[in-house]
Image: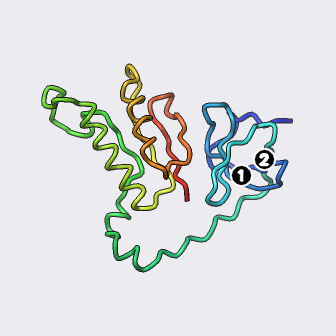
Amino acid sequence: MALNLDDLWIGDPVLIRSTNEQGVYSGKSKTGKAIIKIEDEIKEIDAKNLTEAKEEIEKPKEKNIEIDVIEKLDIKSVSNFKPEIDLHLEKLAPGKSANDFINVIDFQLSKCRYFIQQAIEYNASRIVIIHGKGQGKLKQAVDFLLLEFDEVNLKNSTNNGGAIEVWFKR
């Protein structure tokens, strides 16, 4: 019997029947398949091929970071990095209005691009970009922006269509 993906919580352990691999449920893709994280790999799996795992999955040990990478990164900045950005103008530029900018969407996209670059530099596994629902122009622009980054592995609409969850290749 197939699992009902709506009954799963993000982080629930699952078993892929065809390969006998255990993974963690990470959400539902646009195609309706389950997004499953197995160690550092993300897979889209049909619900018919999943069953609940009986045991909790052992969390992978943290990887050692090369010394030269540590020297390049400001550790304080890395530890303070929040893997979410809200592109609403009032969040990006409190006290400013749309009239203060020649092109608001260009400002939002430049902030988003910098945020994605930081996430990649800090080796984040996933981020959330809140674009809001509105007319969908910013969402389309963010989708197009993500094409610039080869590091993007998977993106998934979340927050009832008001945000995009992005997973990076590892």
Three-letter code, disc 2: Glu
Residue bearing mark 2: 52
**Where 140 falls versus 129 (above or below)?**
above
Q: Quadrant of residue 26?
A: top right
Image point (21%, 39%), residue name: 93
Three-letter code, disc 1: Pro
How far from the left and from the top, in percent, is residue 113?
Answer: 34, 45
**Where 169 falls versus 107 (above or below)?**
below
Crowding near pointer 1: few (<14 within 10 Å), some, many (20+)? many
Q: Which mark is residue 32?
A: none
Quarter of the image with the N terminus in it: top right
Question: Could you say which is closer to the camera, residue 89 or residue 12?
Answer: 89
Image point (41%, 30%), residue name: 139
How far from the left and from the top, in percent, is residue 149?
Answer: 44, 48
In space, the residues marked 2 and 1 are separated at their CA atoms by 6 Å
Classify residue 78 as left or right of residue 106.
right
Q: Which mark is residue 13?
A: 1
Q: Are marks 2 and 1 in contact (CB under 8 Å)?
A: yes
**Where 72 falls versus 115 (above or below)?**
below
Image point (42%, 51%), residue name: 83
Classify residue 170 as left or right of residue 163.
right
Crowding near pointer 2: few (<14 within 10 Å), some, many (20+)? some
Classify residue 99 as left or right of residue 156.
left
